[in-house]
Image (cartoon, rainbow, N blue to C red):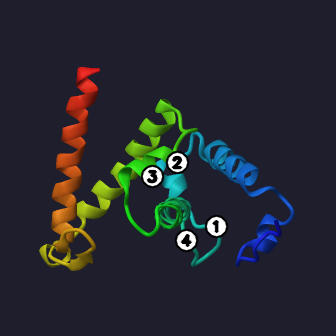
Amino acid sequence: MMAPVTNYSKDLGNREPLAAMRDSIARVAALTRGWTAADFERPYAPGKWTARQVVIHLAQTELALGVRARMALATQNFDQDTWLGRETRVSGVDAVAALAGVSRMNVALFEALSPADRATAMAHPEYGSITVDWIIYTIAGHQIHHLDQLALI
């Protein structure tokens, strides 16, 4: 199969993409190990993003493109059983780390929202019109629901 051409084909070169992803994450961790909050606030060049902004952008892109891939594989729907069935190689430790990281990002975003932001509506294929506030409440309740299940284990 021929590699697709993307905006980042030049950066990837002939490297195998999954190996490159694993290597990049390890390199980010190694590069930032021991950095202070001030280190994360340094830009890579005058007027450019700070290290913190670059890492946030990488995490946001992982979220967005990962969701797009999962939606494509589940025929454009969030089918929890189909999604879960695809995650056969994620360890429990990695799942906890992913949950913690994504949840911290979401909480930080949600804390910064105004009441008008939280009232922003969108169409949901199953529930009709929902708001960002509905999403916040759903996430919180969903976490508690499954936390109770984990506590039973």
Q: Identify which amino acid the numbered label 4 is placed on.
A: Trp
Q: Are marks 4 and 2 in contact (CB under 8 Å)?
A: no
Q: Quick one: SS at disc 3? A: helix
Q: Are marks 3 and 2 in contact (CB under 8 Å)?
A: yes
As drawn, 5 above or below 57: below
Q: Nearer the viewer, residue 30 or 66?
A: 66
- Whichever of labels 3 and 4 marks the residue nearer the N terminus, that label is 4
Q: Quick one: SS at disc 2? A: helix
Q: Quadrant of residue 110?
A: bottom left
Q: Nearer the viewer, mark 1 or mark 2?
A: 2
Q: Identify which amino acid the numbered label 1 is placed on.
A: Tyr
Where does label 2 land, which residue?
A: 86
Q: Quick one: SS at disc 4? A: loop
Q: Quadrant of the C terminus?
A: top left
Residue most extreme to the top: 153
What residue is shown at x 48% (from left), y 45% (from top)? Answer: 85
- Residue 37 rendering spot, x and y as whole percentages: 46, 50
Give the number of marks. Answer: 4
Q: Nearer the viewer, residue 33 or 142?
A: 142
- Whichever of labels 3 and 1 marks the residue nearer the N terminus, that label is 1
Q: Quadrant of the N terminus?
A: bottom right
Q: Are marks 1 and 4 in contact (CB under 8 Å)?
A: yes
> Distance between the Cα atoms at labels 3 and 2?
5 Å
- Residue 14 rendering spot, x and y as whole percentages: 87, 63
Q: Quadrant of residue 6?
A: bottom right
- Whichever of labels 4 and 2 marks the residue nearer the N terminus, that label is 4
